[in-house]
Image (cartoon, grey):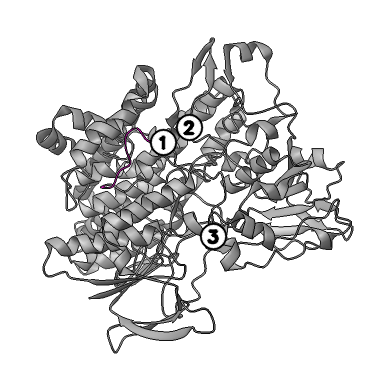
Amino acid sequence: MKVAIIGAGPSALVTAKTLLEASYSDPTFQPSITIFESESDIGGTFRYRAYSNATQVSSKQLTSYSDFRLPLEHKDHLALPEYVQYLEDYTTHFKLRERCEFRMRTKVIKSAKLDGGHLLHYRSLEQGNEGAQDRSELFTHLCVASGLHVTPALPNIPGLPPTIEADQKVTNRMGSEEMVASRIPEPVEHAKDASQIITLHSSQYKDRSLYRAKRVMILGTGETGMDMAYEAVKAGAKEVVLCTRSGFLLFPAVFADFVVFGNVFDGNLPIDGLITNLFETAYVHPWVAGAHLRWFLSDFVIKRLLWCLTGTQAGCNQWVGELEPHQLGRAYTFLNKSSKAMPYINRGWKKRNRYLEKITSYLDPPTVKPEEVSVDLAPFPARVCQDGTVEFLRNGRKEDLRMRNRTVKPDVVVYATGYTQQFDFLSKEYPVPATVRCRDVFDPEDPTVAFIGFVRPGVGAIPPIAEMQAQLWTLILRNKIPAPLSTPHYYLLAEENARIKYGVDYSSYVSTLARDMGSDPGLVELWWQYGCKVTLIYCFGAAFLPFYRLCGPYKHKDAKRIVETEIYDTIRRRGVVGNLIMGLIPMIFYAWINLAAYILEMVYNALSTLTRPFSPSVKGKSLQTEGSMKARRFQSDFEPLNPSAAPVEVNGVKGTGQQGKGRMLRLFALLTAVVTMVGPRGVEANTEIQNFGPVLCRADEYGHLAAKAADQLSSTW
């Protein structure tokens, strides 16, 4: 077995390590692994598209690999140079560097079916372009782990000059701010026309000196856009304009800085570790998972909690830039956890009753100074006039109304617009991550090709997801488990016109892969093997990877120690009140929700049994009815609510797999929608009910497909 891994970032490294580790215990599984990396070292985006002062927004407890942890005393969120050093240590510890071929650019990969493999054509860049050498090599297996954040996404804005040339030797080197500065032309004092505006993608930005005494416009309100706005403020920019398409949902990476009745809460709790396992990711009924009740109900509660603590439901201390009501929630969007720029954005917008402010309030960081420039939120530019004046889109949002009387003529424009996925090196017969059917990793028809690290969590991190994907793929290659094809319930509910459709709920996705592999621990199993402490930590903890190394095929000797020390520390830091509000109460509530689902399923099964004696006694008719019921029950267990689900076929009848839930799921969804109506405002409650619209209609829309398939199944009974 020869395995080619494309890329040398976190996803590629953990895949190579997982494959090699399996070979140590299985003499029949001995892969020869080669990692192809076009750059000169490991690290990927974290090394080559980083900028000064950048810090991870996911915590060390969640981001670290399951068996290679950071010291307990280390701070929760790593600066990017620290994370690159962590990857260096990981590479050294597991002896992965000797598997790496640096300065090797993959040109094209073709399927070599006759030879039973994949023909990789690549070019050596070690001697520069003049001495480049084209090579070819045949591999039996292929892992694409080149990363989500490689090719910049650059929207077309008429009138803006092109971005600076992406000289890889200059702009893609951490710690080379002086070299970058020499590559980027100095912005002129008060650009007199559009041609004098300096434009660059955020991946080319390295140091805040670029913004000093300049008028800066930043496109995009993701985490990078927020970082760019904050950097411009701290650099002493004359003006900072931050452009958004449709808003954002902000929540700081650390839960702290609240004042309640004069008491300051500064627990500094990473928010990606506040979700509990029991009845939220473990022991969840398929109907509850399929209806995404945890997402909707937690959004309902969090909005009201934020209103009590900060005075706004748009986000944590977010007074402008709110999403539309039908998009406002973790079920629909990626949480923006970079909050440093928010105090500067809120200026002029924050208006809260002074009496409520005395009861609860949110503290701005002490680094915010009154004399610093504000950040003006604006719509996206429609075009840039020849004299350099920006014309913004008219969308009727409040930031649009405020900016209509403003003249904006930037000196520097930064595209913080993210990245796009491109797989130009794959020939057309290969799938891409958006088309593979098994957990967004591989196709069951050809498991020799895998895509690792190509889903993005709404809250969480990609490296731990990549580790779980690598473990799943390794088990498939070793023929230890069948390809899991049950319907997933972890996709974020993206709109049809959304640019990013590969978003997942982190805990739902990771726990699904754990169940696929048999790595998810049962409570009795945990108690029997490890005792009460580990069992309680698992119940109150989030979906941390060490939990999935306690049992199953990847059981690790250090997992118990990690859980009892590092993971226990995250729960201890919540305190009694925190564990009550964020742990025990949600746990009890979701326990009742899941119990109700199981009771409804029992009633459904009982009614299905009672109706059989009343079926027509003509031979074949009763069998047909029973067959239809069995088929519908099968569909009910595995029905996704994702409208883009891949088609499935039952005895020649094609459908999306979304058929057949029938009356019981619609009733269940309706009952849970009614629960959300307890809110204080009728309009908001109505919006919450609309969230269940797809649930209430899809069963009817696709039900005829299930019935027809069931009839065909019964005819062959």
- Name the image quarter holding the C terminus: bottom left
The magenta region covers 67-75
Write the residue at 53% across / 10% down: 261
User: Would you say 124 lies left or right of 27 here?
Assistant: right
Q: Which mark is residue 261?
A: none
- Pick whichever, 306 or 132, lies toward us: 132
How far is disc 3 from disc 1 in space, using C-alphas?
Answer: 26 Å
Q: Quick check: marks 2 and 1 in contact, CB under 8 Å?
A: yes
Given the current orientation, which residue lies at the most extreme front position?
178
Q: Amino acid at mark 2?
A: Val
Residue 76 got which mark?
1
Q: Is the N terminus in the top left, top right, bottom left or bottom right quadrant?
A: bottom left
Q: Residue at x 79, y 58 (%)?
A: 197
Q: Which SS class for mark 1?
A: loop
In space, the residues marked 2 and 1 are separated at their CA atoms by 9 Å
Horizontal side of 195 relative to 303 (left or right) equals right
Q: Amino acid at mark 1?
A: Asp
Q: Residue type at mark 3: give it.
A: Arg
Residue under label 3, please give it: 173
The residue lying toward the viewer, choosing from 622 and 24, is: 24
- 684 w.r.t. 709: above or below: above
Disc 2 or disc 3, which is closer to the eye? 3
Q: CA distance from mark 2 to mark 3?
A: 29 Å
Q: Is residue 677 magenta?
A: no
Residue 689, compared with residue 26, is above or below; it is above
Q: Which residue is mark 2?
A: 254
- Total labels drawn: 3
Q: Tell me if residue 21 can be seen.
A: yes
